[in-house]
Image (cartoon, rainbow, N blue to C red):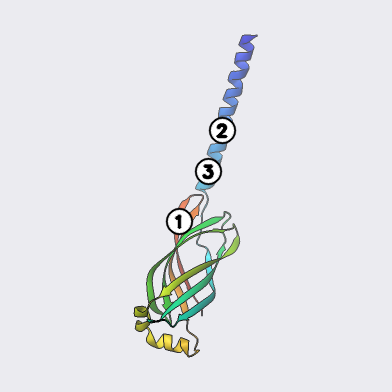
Amino acid sequence: MKRNLLLAALLTGMCVVLSVCLIATTGCNTLANLHVINPSYSLRSVDPHLNLSIPPSIDLNFTVNVNNPNPVGLTLNAFDFDVLVNNNAILRNVHSSQGFQIPAQGASDVHLATHVSYDSIRSIYNEVLNMIQGNKATYGIQGNATYDTPVGPMTFPVTVSSR
């Protein structure tokens, strides 16, 4: 009786080990075949706020729509970008920590905020003057987006403009 019980326990254990090995190798194979591509980006809105303090400055709030064509969800961890006004870089190396979830084969809006100092405004005086007078400026962001994916962290280039 003890021998039959021991044999049954041994066979059960072997079945469990084989099942775990089969599941593990199948899961790894699926991840190995996963090809994550760069989501597409569109600039939904730019909201400039002129601060008339001394010295003056501008706060820029961007809403970027991220469209994920991948079969897995992505977590946007960081957005590193330059801010362009009328194709002139007014801020470089802006870092924005995120943590936004972008659903699989879905889209999500990402909000980016930055502050343009007086020194940066002086370098693009004509563009700022046109903006204050109500003329349309062309805004853009150019940089990289870093995502957490099932295959590890991945960084993709991003270029978006208000044109």
Quadrant of the image containing the N terminus = top right
Q: Give the residue type at disc 2.
A: Val
Q: Residue furthest front?
A: 54
Q: Give SS at disc 3.
A: helix
Q: Which residue is mark 3?
A: 29
**Vertical arrangement, residue 103 with respect to residue 17, above or below:** below
Q: Which badge, 3 or 2, comes first in the chain's sequence?
A: 2
Vertical side of 117 occupied by 150: above or below: above
Per the image, the residue denoted by label 2 is 20
- The numbered disc on residue 154 is 1
Q: Can you tell which quarter of the image residue 122 is in?
A: bottom left
Q: Position of residue 91 (x, y in %)?
A: 38, 74
The image shows residue 76 at horizontal and vertical percentages of 50, 59
Question: Which residue is located at x 60 percent, y 19 percent?
Answer: 9
The numbered disc on residue 83 is: none
Q: Residues within 10 Å of mark 1 (few under 14, many from 20)?
A: some
